[in-house]
Image: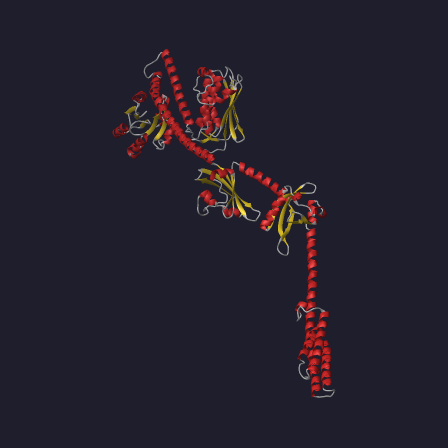
Amino acid sequence: MENRHLFAGIPREKMKSLILLIAILACVILDVYVTFIMGKEIVYTHFFYIPLILAGVWYHTRAIYVAIFLGAVHVLTTFIHTDFGFSIVTLEAVQRAFVFLAAAYFVGFVSREHAKSLLQEEKRRGEEVRKSEGKLKETRDYLNNIIASSADTITVVDMKGIVRDWNKGAEGIMGYRADEVVGTSNRKFFADPEEADRIMELVQKEGEIRDYRTIVLRKDGKPIHISMSAAVLKDKKGVPIGTVRVSRDITKVVELEARIKAERDNLNLILESMVDGVYVVSEDYKVEFMNKVLRHEFGNRVGDICYKVFHNREKPCPLCKLPEVTKGKTARWEWYSRGVNKTYDLIETPLKNVDGTVSKLTIFRDITERKKAEEEIRKLNRELELKVVDLEEVTRMKSVFLSLTSHELRTPLTPMQAQLQMLQEGYMGRLNKKQEDSIAVILRNLTRLDKLINDILDISRIEAGRIKISFESMSLNDTVKEAIKMQEPFAKKKNVKIRARLAELPTIIGDAERLRQVISNLLNNAIKFSKKYADVVVETMQVEENVLFCITDDGIGISKTDKEKLFKPFSQINGSMGREHGGTGLGLAIAKGIIQAHSGKIWVESELGKGSTFYFSIPIKQKITEKEVPYIG
Amino acid sequence: MGERKTIMIVDDEPDVLLSVGQILEANNYRTIKAKDGHECLEKLKEEIPDVLLLDIMMPGLTSKEILNAIEKDSRFAGIKIIFLTAVHMLEAEEEDLLALKQVVDFIGKPFTMRELLDAIEKTD
């Protein structure tokens, strides 16, 4: 306040009144001296204004008392000087006294008003200061509360590493009370005491540190992972006086991170050890991951652009599945890599990231070997097809050959048989008994040779799938009767009785001549292998949608192993027996071929020594119009 | 019995020609022999037989060609044709040899005398 006063540096209150008094006295003495010693009554009153102004400034309107006093003195001195008579001089003195009064009042008034306004200003300022001080306190309390209630540790450490402040959070996390640690070194808190120096150095160098991870020890010795942020604390002049540190207990975070890392490592290990290649590419074609197999094949190109890495292109591939996969679709396709000369089966699936973007996960299955194998199989198949064609050609040629051969074989038989018949019929003159018998033997064997040729031709046609069948509506029973009639003489000769039990049957579609051939063959076999005076039983019946023919003898029977080869060509069970009983060994194979050409089945039930039963069945409702029917061997 | 029937035998095998001729002549038929298709058609120009005994699978003209020639010429319309062959009947049918109306029978080789004589008798 004093600094702002008009007369700065003026002494205090007592000094003021002393100065004022001296000034007044000086004025009085000067007035008396001028008036009485020098004898001048009128002039030299200007110096009277000095005490007047001083009084006005210092004591405001109370300066009028000084003006009254000095005015009175001046009037009195002039009055005395004029010998106590009123003169113009006295009057002038009175006038001056009033001027003094007015001047004193004016200066005092102005000074008072000025002082008043100064005072008000001061007051206002004072109030403002009080107000802001209150606010400051409030803020400080608030901050103190925050600091106290913070879960994080907030500590202040001076430049020497001595703890200066220690909040509640620090007490909670570290286990030390503030009064235990304030004033002591902070080195003991760190698992590695050197860490205290390193942090101090770092903070000083950088001005602050953020999320600095280290391990501290609780009072009970338990290590805690913390993340520390610290800043230098400076005094008013900007000189560093310490550091304030905020630390958070991140033990759980660190543990979680460790666990996540372990799991990730585990996952990585799985991915790394997979035989299939795995890679992840982001929406903007950046390779985010490649496993070992792919790194081995294509090099570690994580961070590169996929179409450059895998396809050596400058633009995304035209067939790229990335756009559709990132929309949630799954794709599967085969890709041949020219670069590594391998074929891959690619399975591409969307992979949602934590940030909401979608990457593409691709599994590369190397199917190069499989492809090769498939190609090999295709090749073999083609070769096989060619061989089948060759075989078919061979079969056809065989068929043609046999057909020609049998024609050529029959040709010489024809004149032989004709000539012998003429001899037998006596065209060449009468024959004696021996000659007749001789011719009969020759003719019988001619017939047998003819039958053999026919059988060979039949079996070759059956095997070539070219058996000739002429299908017509026919009665199986009629065919059976006809066959029996034809075999009767042979049965009679062997003293075997043929007994027939023929059920009423519907007509079937078949080749009567061919079926008669089959039945004759079966009958002939049955008679051939029967004992003398035995019965051969022939039966027909309808079983469901089939007609069934069976013929039973009580002959030598057939063993199980022989049954299997019974229906194969040239498989007469026993060579010597075949010769003994006569026959070509083709009859049953031909029978099987004929029955199969009728979509039927032929089989045998037999026990060695106890006779056999041969069966065949033919479907009733069957319409076969083809003349050539494939043979199923 | 009226007029003696004339029978033409066509076969490339001389022994067959001889044997069939012997049988037929012994049974009072007149025979004309031809050793192949050309000779057959040649001799047909000279004389038209009642019955033609025709082999299948001969060198020269095929049986089909012989049949076609007979079919074309109206003078031959009265000839009855009997196949006498080692070829299977179904094969003959396959080759469309049995379709012609004049073909009346089919005898497989080797034949019996009875079959041959019955077949010829039936042509009356």
Give the percent coordinates (x, y) of residue A254. 62, 43
Could one spot residue A98 in this view of the protein?
no
Q: x and y percent of residue A405 in the render?
A: 36, 23
Side (left or right) of A11 relative to A342: right
Q: Quadrant of residue A129?
A: bottom right
Residue A387 to residue A210: above or below? above
Quadrant in the picture for the N terminus of chain A: bottom right
Of residues A452 and A489, the one drawn nearer to the viewer in this rendering: A452
x%, y% of residue B1?
32, 24
Q: Quadrant of residue B21?
A: top left
Residue at the far front in the pictured view: A37
Where A230 falls versus A62 (above or below)? Answer: above
Query: For this rendering, which residue is in front, A37 or B110?
Result: A37
Q: Is residue A163 left or right of residue A571?
A: right
Task: Identify the residue at image location x=60%, y=45%.
Answer: A198
Give the farthest residue toward the left.
Answer: B46
